[in-house]
Image (cartoon, rainbow, N blue to C red):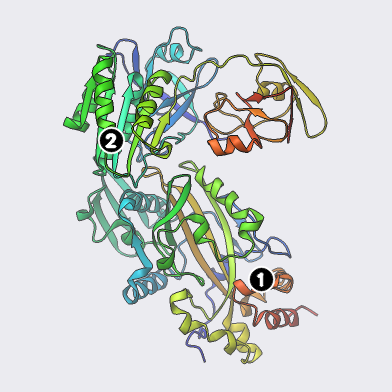
Amino acid sequence: MSDRIRLVVTAIDDDVPGIRTLTLAAADGRVLPDFTPGSHVVLECDGPANAYSLTGDGTMPTTYSVSVLEVPAGAGGSRWVHGLAVGDPVIALPPRSMFAPILQGSRHVLVAGGIGITPILSHLRSAVRWGREVELLYAYRDGRGAHLDEVKELAGDRARFFTDRTSFAESLAATLADQPIGAHLYTCGPAGFMDAVVETATALGWPPSRIHLEHFGVEALDPGEPFQAVLADGRVLDVPSGVSLLEALEGAGLDVPQLCRQGVCGECRVTVRSGVPLHRDLFLSAEAKAANDSLMCCVSRAEGDRLEIDL
Amino acid sequence: MTAHLPTTETARDLIEGFAFPFPTDQYRYSTNVEPARTPVVTPTGQWGDAVVDVDSEYRHELAERERILAADPSRYAVLDHMRPACWDTMITLMRELALARPDTMSLEALGGGAFVWTNRLLDVEQRFTLADESTLPMEPLRYIATQVQEDLVLLDQRDDDLWGDAGVVTFAADWSFGFDVGMNFLEIHGPVPRLRQTGVITRAREFIMRLQPGQVYRRTNWTLTIGRRLDVSTELYPEWGPDRPMIQTVDDETFGRLVHLRTEVQHLLRLPESGGVLFLSRTYLLPFADLATVEPWRARTAAVLADLPEDMADYKGVISYRDRAVAWLEARAPS
């Protein structure tokens, strides 16, 4: 698996209530791995590892910046970040890019909801550097807008800010209705927010290939129905409700590559020999899902009561 | 007689650093990628510890590239949207050069997007500012092609595919970069036999599309070339095509000096800022006369050539002299 990066917290900014911005540098002071705009890093914290978008400049970075919304009822990652102090060590996995700008885009429409501004900010920075046509719509709760000054400085009048739903919805529809051929839309925010953005775009005729989503805070999946997994050596594993196939495989002593454990990173893909998977991941394309010959075992399950897999 | 008959002995470092391409006695197409930066020890020395390789041919090959580009500008192309990827490529390769040759090359970040590139082998000290073309003597992809021996192809990733949208390719082995610019990955590889049917090419594409910044992989490819000729592009076929019938008529000594095993060491890496993919291809040529002095290489090359199926031998352009090449190598087996 990837080499871990040893970081140390060099600055903390708590100016926006509920949102903490961490600045992290390499513990040995070296230049950190480069990253593509829209990338995230996985930070190892107490409990499950969490992915956070990198907001800074990705070329020969000496620091990484992440902004984390405190979710008191979450799995614990955000509370852990909000408990850190300057000087604390943090272990990260190298940046991963799943939400890159499309170079050929004739225009780039960025739409952020709340803390979803974080990957959008690095897109904006890159668009400004390379002179790409860009505009940004940023919706947030009054008093809770992260990175407002930075966005204003980078984008000038190409950014518009919204603190009420109605004017945001109206502006979004008007903006998406008036774009040149070859425009691309990038959005990040809570699931309901992104659903609304995609719905508006789709209704206006935007094809899916021009709409790009960055998911965060993947909603808890339902525990699912129990099923049996048949392994290549003939062993049969019970996968009860509330236990993932990945967990069942690990319980049986199998070493399955995995990273995010939430259907995003693509590491734990398993080949299906027979049976129909119930796909619940965000990684596989619609085409790959329809082929039903593989599944992401951290979140996906079986449509029936048996799944034969190539492990 | 060809103009490319080598008049001097092969430089020692070209034999010691030769990337011998055959891991077994049989060659078939495969998705033969492996992590880069790991040295491969060979009977003569080693290769593969760096992503870019500078050897004793450095100045000569860079001069050769300039001559080719002056004669045929279509070997270099950049589609408009690839501008950030060209900058990315330049910065990436300067850092790789500095890693490979820390004694003579360095890239220093001055802050605010300003850099100094130093290359003492070429007596270069170049200050520039990222994304500002006016601070370089030429466009960044074209500029870095004056500093590395590798050929460069930049792939854009969009619509679930890879597109060859920029590059500098002066040392192509029987293909044409100018013809391929703007094609997608499967189109570029369309002429290669067996790739589609075996699934090798779609697997390679899936693999490349999932590359992350910082990951560098490599593979080798090979063919035979007559004469120490780097540019065997389709464009120049009228120049080198006649060497294939000619080589069947020469005496054994000339055959061994003219026929070269040609290895391409190809690196693939994700460009961080643009999200593009950089494909590097570095060409190594070793005359059979030198190859035959290394017994494991002689025996293996003979075995691979003897076993090579007709369609692959035809595609590689060696079918007309393959039998003689095998016989030539076998005749030099130790008694």
Answer with left or right where residue A301 lies relative to residue A145: right
The percent position of residue A163, horizontal first and vertical second, equals: 25, 15
The amino acid pointed to by label 1 is Asp
Residue at 47% across, 7% down:
A73
Identity of the residue furthest to the right in this view:
A234
For label 1, the SS is helix
Q: Chain of mark 1?
A: B
Is any part of residue B37 visible from this angle? no
Tag count in the figure?
A: 2
Q: Chain of mark 2?
A: A
Distance from Cα at disc 1 to Cα at disc 2: 50 Å
Report which residue position mark 2 lands on. A125
For label 2, the SS is helix
Answer with left or right where residue B297 lies relative to residue A181: right
Decide: is A138 above or below A95. above
User: Which quadrant would residue B306 be assigned to in this image?
Assistant: bottom right
Report which residue position mark 1 lands on. B311
Marks 1 and 2: same chain? Answer: no
The residue nearer to you, when weighing A294 against A259, is: A294
Residue at 54% across, 85% down:
B243
Answer with left or right where residue A199 lies relative to residue B38: left
Decide: is B160 above or below B70. above
The percent position of residue B214, horizontal first and vertical second, equals: 47, 42
Residue at 41% across, 48% down:
B276
The residue nearer to you, when weighing A237 against B44, is: A237
User: Which quadrant would residue B15 be assigned to in this image?
Assistant: bottom right
